[in-house]
Image: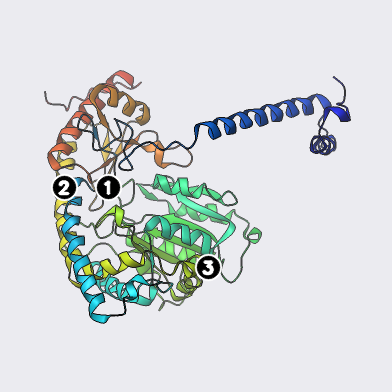
Amino acid sequence: MGIPSARDLTKPDEMLYRFHRGRNIDSRQFLNMHETIAYKKKKRRKMNKNFTMEGVQDPYLRHLFDGDPIFNVYNKEAINMSVGAPGPDLLKQCTDILSNATVHRMDEEKKEGKFYLFQYGITPGLWECREELAKFLSRRYGDPVKREHLILTCGATHGLQLSITSIISPNGIIFVEEVTYMIALDAFKQFPLMKIVTVPMKNDVVDLDAFEKIISKIKKGEFYLNNQKIFWAMFYTIPTYHNPTGMVLPPDSCKRLVEIARNNSILIVAEDVYNLLHYEDGFPPHRLFFYDDPSEPNYKGGNVISNGSFSKILSPAIRFGWIESSPRIAHIFKTSGILCSGGATNHYVSGLITSLLQEKIEDKHLNMLIETYKERLNALCETLDRYLPSCCSYNRPKGGYFVWIHLPPDIDAAAFIKWCQKEYRVSAIPGIRFSYTGEAKNFLRLSIAFHLKNTLIKAATILCKGLLNYIRNHSGNNYTDNKIVT
């Protein structure tokens, strides 16, 4: 096959051909490339045409989990243990809670007569709300939280997005744990100039030895930095009641992780959405932000952000959260073009939250959630202790939503769940969904959040029975376990 003539190529194709001639790509290779590109263009035009003709797909759906009979957590004919969200028995409390908060806040607005709640707000968020939130967090954490360190957000996902776009190099690196919150991974993929790097885990928490080795191999001088983009990389982590493992990073590891961040000019974004769901006596474990102590000689101005949300302690629909950060980071957020232009995020809802906190309504609700989830977690773990095949294991969490099941190495959890959905109408999330690199194939995540205690017991019993049958028929090892009592 000869070199294509000028009339066979468009001007861009001709330029592309000359470029590839310089790279020692012959005419046959180029024509193959040209035909492939032409085919893809034709296919794309066809897809665009179909899209234009068919319009945007917008089916009638009521909630995030709607549209699939297996994964629809409201479907009574199947039990989906995947969902990290409260169920209707808990959400129904929000009708009276928000009604009372609304009445209280409207009365306060009428008394003052200025109706600032309906005006554009200040960049970091409603002052009164941040004041009450600081008091609430201080008494629930058992650690001091300062109003001026808080920036209000529309939830943890919004806080994460603000952190990436405001203070991280646009061509920087995002470090993530080997398994992590799966939708955060989806969000990170929206930043194509950034590189996602996975950090191994040991005993269901981050392996800090491996993390340091990974950092040491990265060239630090290739990133765009200025007076706002002050970090070349961030480490996204869930140190307290991890999603999906349910574990807590020990205090010594927290201190070491902060030192690693300081010594390498890395930002740690700690997803602190489960901290207050603590099911033991006393205060919850210190958040990672606590260990970045300004009084220490190696303090570098703040390398940790605590990213919180009311989605787990009130309602996902509220879309209210906060970022807790050091003064230098808070200042960058306060000068953010998006926050300045927005006139505070979720300003009206911040007023309602202020009333919930002032009247101690949220304290009462959180206490109820803790007792409810504690009972559910105990019930689930007791069921697993009784029925889970001995070739499987889990570490019992002390808070949060999730239990992380370890299956035998040769068992594919995704294949098992697909089979279990068909055979038993019970579902959970396979571990591979939480891994950027496709690891954790022999793990399952169970959630206690949505279902009532008796439903969890029933579903866990069925799941364990299905696991035993599946392992016996699909494992290459000879497991003789027979824990299921029939």
Apparent side of residue 299 relative to residue 50 in the rendered image (left or right) = left
Query: Is 128 or 246 nearer to us in this picture?
Result: 128
Q: Which three-letter amino acid code belongs to the residue tagged 2? A: Asp
Q: SS of the residue at dot 1?
A: loop
Q: SS of the residue at dot 3?
A: helix
Between the C-alphas of marks 1 and 2, the distance is 12 Å
Q: Residue at x 81, y 31 (%)?
A: 25
Q: Which residue is mark 3?
A: 337
Residue 85 badge: 1
Between the C-alphas of marks 3 and 1, the distance is 32 Å
Tell me residue 252's x, y (percent).
Answer: 35, 62
For the residues labelled 1 and 2, say whether their Cβ atoms are less than 8 Å apart.
no
Residue 440 visible from this viewpoint: no
Query: Is 397 or 297 nearer to us in this picture?
Result: 397
Q: Which residue is mark 2?
A: 89
Query: Is 227 or 284 nearer to us in this picture?
Result: 227
Q: Residue at x 14, y 42 (%)?
A: 453
437, above or below 77, in the image: below
Q: Which quadrant, please, contains the C terminus?
A: top left
Q: Which three-letter amino acid code belongs to the residue tagged 3? A: Gly
Q: Work out whether mark 2 precedes mark 3 in sequence or the reverse, and give the earlier one.
A: 2
Q: Which three-letter amino acid code belongs to the residue tagged 1? A: Ala
Tell me residue 397's x, y (percent).
Answer: 24, 49
